[in-house]
Amino acid sequence: MLRLLALTVCGGFLFGMSLTANAAEKIVITGSSTVAPLVAEIGKRFEEQNPDVRIDVQTGGSSRGINDARSGLANIGMASRSLKDEEKDLKGTAIARDGIGIILNAANMVRSLTDQQIVDIFLGKITDWSAVGGKAGPITVVNKADGRSTLELFLNHFKLKASDIKAQVIIGDNQQGIKTVAGNPNAIGYVSVGTAEFEAGQGTSVKLLSMNGIPATVENIQNGSFPLARPLTLVTKDEPSGVVRAFIDFAQSAAVHDLVKEQFFVPVLP
Amino acid sequence: MSPCSRDARLFWILSASALIASGLLLLILVFLAKESWPVIQNAGLSKFMRSDGWYPTEGAYGLLPMLAASMAMSALAIIIAAPLGVASALFCRFYAPPLISRMYRWAIILLAGIPSVVLGLWGLTVIVPLILAVSPPGTSLLAGSIILALMILPTVALTTEAALAAVPMTYWQGAAALGLSKEATILRVALPATAASIYAGILLAVARALGETMAVLMVSGNVVQLPSSLFDPVRTLTANIALEMAYATGDHRASLFVSGLVLTALVLALAAGARRSGGQIVHA
């Protein structure tokens, strides 16, 4: 009986909401599944502050985001990269940056690896740490599961194919990656820099490797100097105006930095 | 109210409940089939029954290694858990002093109540490094089996104990009258009389092992390959779904539903097997 009552109340509430939604302005946002969870959270907060605006977030990849923005199917497109040269007719705004760092166990003597060494390790051509200046021991390659945005960024950066990687452990989220590497002195993996920096600071026995001599820090991702990073971009057809402009400004503002960090991304500086 | 109309009311309540229960199962099956249909139609079912690689974003859907891993891991787990569970129930029932027996039973019940993610975390920080010291990478078929064995041990122990408690008093009296020793009574009278129930408990445990996800995902390494040794990392069907579902779209997503469909088929086959070979109850 109580449940029935709750249902009725819920239904009434939804009904009421749909009525206001008809009167409200609606922003349709489509594109990259990397950016979508963050934009959905930002959208929720934006709706709270602007009760007459409805935000509809749909995924379908960065290309769909750009196509939809260009064709006008969506007010805003989402892309997990910066705009290419042939897309410069559109207007792109970075709302956050996504950066990944290579992590080793803190007990590992190796201080740095070249890009070529990292590629050879992940392809299974180098299988012992002694080949790259470490203490002899079989390398445990920790890779991400198919479909993860960190995997995609890693593969793109090193120009690899998912099926070429010879991994000994495959993990889902960043936490699992950090626990796996912390528990295995011979492991190598990659996770979001924000998480790894936090965990290393908490005393977890992992360390982040520098890339091309640039330390993997949130700061270096923010200023754009760290190579293994990409911007999360909102794309519009023209210079945005009205409520769309308000939303994009909101998504860049300090008011959503906590949401950005929750998703292990790095806020952009204004 | 006449007894007749009360009967009718009970009949309708019970039929409705049964219908809802079986209807839900049917709905789940229909849902699984519907979600996996697009990729089965595009790629064909034969593409899944292969072992040459699982790269759904590149169009390779070999599920066979994961099917093998699921079966191997559950089989190993039950090989570890069944003797331990039955032995501990026998100990508890016939040899332990009452205080120890009660404490032991509480420990088993407590073990049954530990959330799988906690067991997984414990496995990742304790069991995996131990195996790593023997043969890297540590996260392996063996680690998964050990954790699964711990999870299903209570099921075997508790069902066995309940079955032993239900052995009719006349059996004990008969055995005593024949002058049988305690050992002979347990091995030749009590165990055969409870075999069907113990077997049912074991099947229940295997079904749970097949469906377990979180703990297995954390300790078994999740590399898609046919295991050639206990120390190889493997990926089970359940871990596959949990690992990739959150970020999968299109055919990739549909192929994960095929994983679910195959897993469901495996559990149904197990249940069917149980019906065929089980069923006979020795004591009524």
Image (cartoon, coloured by chain):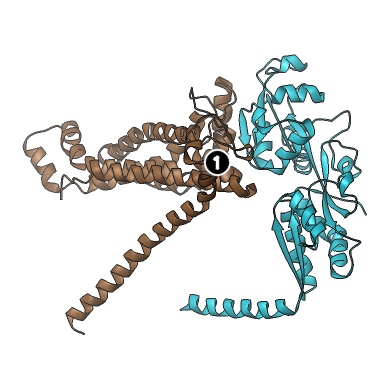
Q: Is residue B101 visible?
A: no
Q: What element carries label 1?
A: helix
| Residue B266 point in image, percent of width and height | 39, 42
| Residue projecting furthest to the left | B177
Say which amino acid is labelled 1: Asn
Chain with cyan colouring: A
> The numbered mark 1 sits on a residue in which chain?
B
Residue B190 in the figure: left or right of residue B240:
left
Image-based side of A214 in relation to B152, left or right? right
| In-front residue for pair A186/B180 | A186
Residue extending furthest toward the bottom: B1
What chain is the brown one?
B
Depth check, front residue: B230 or B129: B230
The relative height of residue B19 versus residue B135 in the rendered view (above or below) is below
Q: Is residue A76 visible?
A: yes
Q: Quadrant of residue B197?
A: top left
| Quadrant of the drawing holding the C terminus of chain A | bottom right
Residue A116, percent from left and from top:
79, 22
Number of residue marks:
1
Question: Which residue in the structure is indicated by mark 1?
Answer: B240
- Residue A112 vertical position relative to residue A241 in the rendered view, above or below: above
Other residues around mark 1 within 10 Å, as few (<14) / some (14–19) / many (≥20): many
Give me the residue at 35% from left, 34% from top.
Answer: B84
Q: What is the quadrant of the N terminus of chain A in the image?
A: bottom left
Q: Residue at x 32, y 45 (%)?
A: B271
